[in-house]
Image (cartoon, rainbow, N blue to C red):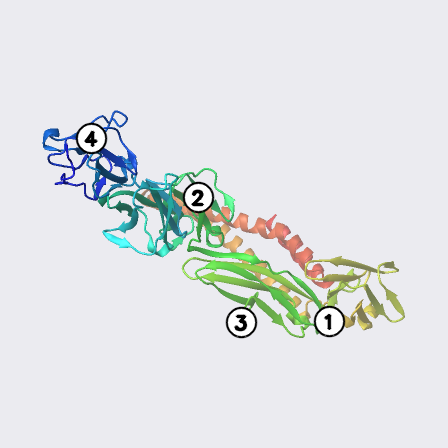
Amino acid sequence: SNYTSAMFSQQPQDLVVVAGQPVTLPCTIPGYHGVVLWIKDGLALGVGRDLSGYPRYTVIGDHGSGEHHLRIQRVELMDDAVFECQAVQAAMRSRPARLTVLVPPEDPVISGGPVVSLRAGDPLNLTCHADNAKPAASIIWIRNGEVLNGAMYSKTLLRDGRRESTVSTLYLSPSNIETGQQIICKASNKAVPNGKETSVTIDIQHLPLVNLSVEPQPVLEGNLVKFHCSAKANPPVTLYRWAKGGSIIKEVSGDTYEVIVDHSFFTEPVSCEVTNPLGSTNISRNVDVYFGPRMAAEPQSLQVDLGSDAVFNCAWTGNPSLTIVWMKRGSGVVLSNENLLTLKSVRQEDAGKYVCRAVVPRVGAGEKEVSLTVNGPPTISSTQTQQALHGEKGQIKCFIRSTPPPDRIAWSWKETVLESGTSGRYTVETVTTEEGVISTLTMSNIVPADFQTIYNCTAWNSFGSDTEIIRLKEQESLPVAVIIGIAVGAFVALIVLMGTIGAFCCTHLKGVVSAKNDIRVEIVHKDHNAARENEEHTSMKQLMVSVSVAVYYFPLLVAFFRNKILTLIVMFLHALLKLTVT
């Protein structure tokens, strides 16, 4: 038949289709009953309706009406081509129809998701890739509903020459990120205009953030204090470690430490070290402990030369702040309120004990005593006139203060010099005491010439010497007036005694006579006489005791009065009294 008049009533048009969708390319040639070929990129797909080489392709429509539509069941990328419909016998071909196949990207992937961990202070770099898309996917980043700008974008053409992979990198500075935030990567192209998205959660990891509380404060030493170490950490805390003054406290392992505090907690801080997988954070606190003075620098006793300066240093610690006072023992004068006490150009009278006293108001006080010894020439202090009895042993003493101790002590009189030991009637003995040196010159038998002699006591040391002149004075006997007084007193006492005895005897005899002569009186006054007899008996007893005491204590008086004349008088009175009593 003649097909020259055949015409296309329907021709395939350019189409854009998403991979996986079905598509129909229309081709209608009314009245044409010859062979129809479908050409893809210049190659025939088959003859007529036999497209056995392409299982997804079929030719559909009413053949009698000239309908030769190409049906593609599920479009694939390989279908992306130029198609033509040809009427072979009529030598007709349709216009070329471009079938564009769109491929959606695969689900986007953020590297390191779904949780991205980073250290606090580090910037965030996120990479999202959307692969195998046609055309290449565009990627946007979204946080809290807002698009984040500034991402770096790159794409790569795949080997098939059609699909592309896209990579987007987002950089966020440390100040622009918070832990727990969600960031979305959204990839889209014409195949998926609404896009595909994925998200990651930001996990900012940090070293433990630590706070150390101390309760109560201030606190008096000896009381209980509680330390609490509160920590925020990501990842969580794995270890608590406590120390005081750098030394580990092994018995505590939790976040709380309770202890009875002393003064050392004021100067030695307590520290809490908190560890997590990233590392450790250490925080320390001193405790405001109130405590009484404690010696920090102990003052030392000094021995200085005469005219030199003496400097004492005394340091205390205490809390709250303390006051320091330097005083000389035995004096109320404050010499210094500083740690240092400086005594300029010391004199020998500056020697003695000094006290450094510290006071913490309402908490406590403490003091430390030191001594100042002044090196200088000896000083002698002695009574310039000393006494002795004629004919007895006599002693004169010389008291020497000397720092350093005396190298030599000598007694001299007339032509004699004696330092130690015995020479004739004279002996020198030296005794050292805490206060100084006592040198004693002893004379075995005092003669009148000794009372006319001048004695020199001299002491030397490396700084010089001192001398004291001592005289010996005869010890006085009792004056004659005193002796006469005692004799008269004794004589009067004797007369009184004799009178008492006489009166007693007479009274006793008289009582006996009246009892015999007058019987009535005896009867009437019986009770009275009995009482009187009792009285007389008691008086007699007392008298005898008094006399006995007097008689036997007179020899003691003799021993007391060493004077020869007085001794004779006392002995005479004693003999007389003894005779009378007997």
The residue carrying mark 4 is 35
- What residue is rendered at 24% in x and 37% in y? 19
Tell me how far mark 4 sits from mark 3, CA to CA: 139 Å
Q: Is residue 75 visible?
A: no
What's the distance in space between the residues labelled 4 and 2, CA to CA?
78 Å
Residue assigned mark 2: 278
Residue on which the image places disc 3: 333
N-term-proximal mark, 4 vs 3: 4
Frontmost of labels 1 and 3 is: 3
Query: Mark 1–mark 4 contact, CB under 8 Å?
Result: no
Q: Tell me if residue 340 comes above or below residue 269 in the rendering.
A: below
Front residue of this view, candidates 553 and 418: 418
Mark 3 vs mark 2: which is more N-terminal? Answer: 2
Disc 2 marks a residue whose amino acid type is Leu
Q: Name the residue beneath numbered marker 1.
A: 385
* Residue 448 at x, y percent in the picture: 82, 69
